[in-house]
Image: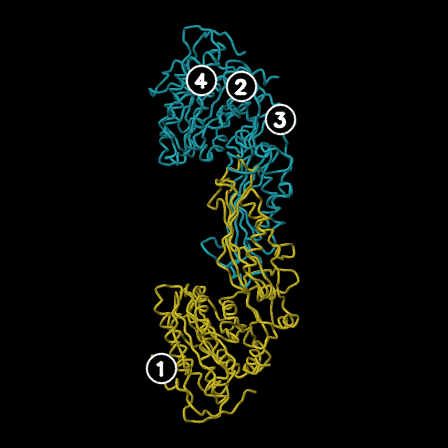
Chain colours: A yellow, B cyan
Amino acid sequence: MGRVAVVVVGISPPLRRPSRPLGRTKCGSSPEVGSPAVTTVPEYVAAHADEWLSGLLDWLRIPSQSGDPALAPQVRRSAEWLASALRAAGFPTVEVWETGGHPAVFAEWVSEDAGAPQVLVYGHHDVQPVDPLEAWTSAPYEPRVAGDKVFGRGAADDKGLVAFHLLGIRAHLAATGRTSPAVTLRVLVEGEEESGSPNFPALLRARRDRLGCDVVVVSDTGMWGRETPSVVTSMRGLISCQLDLVARDVDLHSGSYGGAVHNAVTELTKLLASLHDADRRVTVPGFYDGIVEPSPEERALIARLPFDEADWLSVAHSVEGVGEAGWSTLERVWARPTAEVNGVWGGYTGPGTKTIIPREAHAKLSFRLVAGQDPVHVKSVVEAWLGSAVPAALRWSVEWEGDGVRPCATPLDAPALAAVREAMGRAFGQEVLVTREGGSGPEADLQDILEAPVVFLGTALPDSGWHAPDENADVPMLLKGAEAAAYLWEILPGALKS
Amino acid sequence: MGRVAVVVVGISPPLRRPSRPLGRTKCGSSPEVGSPAVTTVPEYVAAHADEWLSGLLDWLRIPSQSGDPALAPQVRRSAEWLASALRAAGFPTVEVWETGGHPAVFAEWVSEDAGAPQVLVYGHHDVQPVDPLEAWTSAPYEPRVAGDKVFGRGAADDKGLVAFHLLGIRAHLAATGRTSPAVTLRVLVEGEEESGSPNFPALLRARRDRLGCDVVVVSDTGMWGRETPSVVTSMRGLISCQLDLVARDVDLHSGSYGGAVHNAVTELTKLLASLHDADRRVTVPGFYDGIVEPSPEERALIARLPFDEADWLSVAHSVEGVGEAGWSTLERVWARPTAEVNGVWGGYTGPGTKTIIPREAHAKLSFRLVAGQDPVHVKSVVEAWLGSAVPAALRWSVEWEGDGVRPCATPLDAPALAAVREAMGRAFGQEVLVTREGGSGPEADLQDILEAPVVFLGTALPDSGWHAPDENADVPMLLKGAEAAAYLWEILPGALKS
């Protein structure tokens, strides 16, 4: 399967550009100009893997930490490196897009096929901070290859996954003999994902006319494991806030007043304790409005994942799993909405004792949301709940962190998702299971602003050390990602038509 | 009533000592040596009020803040001033007692009457800090008299109340014609009450042989009001702790784990919310063990106090009173035990959002205790409750602040309490009601270590500004205190015999 004999018959104009303007760009490669060849996706990928990896290592040397203002020039260097690499891979149009913060990179390769579907690939080229630096085995920006692994900040999150598309598009062309991809391919790689994508929604809105697409392919996720290729079907949304509860403007002496007036901390604990019922369902009326539960088919697929509760608890540093009755651990973190208290404070918190009745109490709350839930609706039902649950003698206020992140979900039978599972199935030679992600980044913005379904194509492994020391990517898995991308561009036109 | 013609017939040896060795001691006065006179307690007090007040002002000029190490020499000066004043008042034995911290002052005047009861008067000569200094109308250590009031740090808490005993003992002798008091009078005035009396229990134990008594008269309390003289019948005890709850050793990402593991803050809120039932009774099993409820007679007396709920709420900066069902506001703060959360913290408490599942949560708890409750027993029932209420998957620990303070209570029909009410009744010329205090100082130590009942003789008014700027005492009320003390020494021998 996937073995297609092709002859490269021409070179599209952009490929005539210098392929390595910065002298160190090796990702992707020019087609074998003038040397017609029969190749397959795996053969092409294998033949160009070393050259591609060398380019990736160059990219990983750029400390593109979006969170450190002092490294802003490095984020720009990273964008420029990627722009060059996309040009070298053949994209006729490559632009660095300015934002209110760090630049994003845009590329476009219009398919010559009439009616070809339009695809937007999303990723990010900024990386997490490296603290604690002393916990790294080798310097985070001096990438090294050890066995199958490449170690370095950004290897898995997200440069390695963005980079496999540089190889994937070339493999697609080489294996199909095409001079343009079977889909009109657009790529948008932002530079602020690790800082919460503060300018990304505005960028999407401003560039909406350039970003039109039938499907968004997000490459910023992982798989269940090396032996269990899988595709993410959804990400939970999020809305968070600070709740302030005020009983009065002064702390009172508990000897003089204890037992006869409201204690703001006690009232807060009663409120927060009442957030869940005995089955650990969220009690806020209307919280579950419109929720779309996972289909029996998806629940069955999730149940087939080789999940080891003890291992999972060990990774979670926990001795017991606990959550909403009637759902498995994976379903609880992937498919069920939550209300979490992220922090609480009030009254005296210093050493020793201060026998006061606290005047105020505060909590940080966050709500993870699943398909069918709207963060703006959740805001309103939480406020209605507070209005009815807080005693009238106390004042409360809630400050929301923006409008939150909408959940992002693809039904299992969505054609694009089926195409991704088929493409990965070809690459890995086995059935592709499904996972979900408990949290999300800007994927929901892509879905909502571009009004297109989002699918996930990512091949990072669970031990990638995302956001941690010794971040690494498994090179064979990245190459499988390149293969899957190559197949996906080939499969999508038919899948989206059917 | 109280008008007793006496003739001073002799001078006890200590009175021959120089009466003002520091040249500024005017509190108390020598008896009218060699000039037999007929006087009454009020007449004596009125005649010596100016001289006595002048002495008090001298004492108030000494900044005896026990909480400020830099002022330790001033606390010692205050002790020395008081020792001199006690000598001047005629006490044959006056000693400055060293402690692990600031010195206390001890005085003793043995009654010549065979079988006279032994009384220990307790007070303190240290004072609170003066912050915020800018809120004072005049300098805290430059006492001033304005109308009936004397303003200055310590005027009401507690120098003014200790000082009225200097005048009271002289009035007692003058009005009864005695050369020694009708009771063997011992006085112990400590110098660390405002710092929590850290060395006081040890002092009581070490000096127990010198402090034996049939009753302790504590002069460090107030009355309901100028028009409503009253006596305190009990003080609540206290035991406090810090509770630490640990779900694991790391915070978890709420996207990855939210909904499937224990949240330490949520578990803490459930625990704290369950501390009270719907009637706001404490739910800890065994918490109410042995409790002595106020008698119907005392409840009726309390109900006669001119209590204005709206005024009380205004002083409490609160819009609503709330507490244990079945008890009035005053009973809730005076006669009912409580469990209060003094502070709480856990998880992320900074600006913005951090979507974590907190690993730990903490609370400061305090329990106010009433007659019949033992703080050590309360410790054990709280720990037993934690052991059963905290989910097994979480670790908890509780750190108690020592062994707490036992409640201090005098039954309404106790002879010493009846004597205090009678003595105050003579001084004020009206019935004396009863109040309680919601908190307590070292009174329970006196009761427990000396194994003697404690009664309260204090005439501070509610607007004294205890622990606050513009602290003040009402001079006529202090003089009524002196009169009441004079009557009390006269009444007690008969009262304690009956």
Residue where numbered disc 2 is placed? B424
Q: Residues within 10 Å of mark 1 (few under 14, many from 20)?
A: some
Label 4 or label 3, whichever lies nearer to me, is 3
- Marked residue chain, label 3: B
Left or right of A18? Residue B445 is right
* Marks 2 & 1 on one chain: no
Residue where numbered disc 1 is placed? A20
Q: Which three-letter amino acid code belongs to the residue tagged 3?
A: Glu
Q: Which three-letter amino acid code belongs to the residue tagged 2?
A: Met
The N terminus of chain A sits in image quarter? bottom right
Residue B341 place in picture, x, y as percent: 54, 44
Is residue A23 in view from this perspective?
A: yes
Looking at the image, do the residues carrying marks 3 and 1 touch, with CB atoms under 8 Å apart?
Answer: no
Vertical position of residue A186 compared to residue A291: above or below: below
Q: How far apart are the two marked residues, 2 and 3, measured between alpha carbons?
A: 18 Å
Is residue A45 in view from this perspective?
A: no
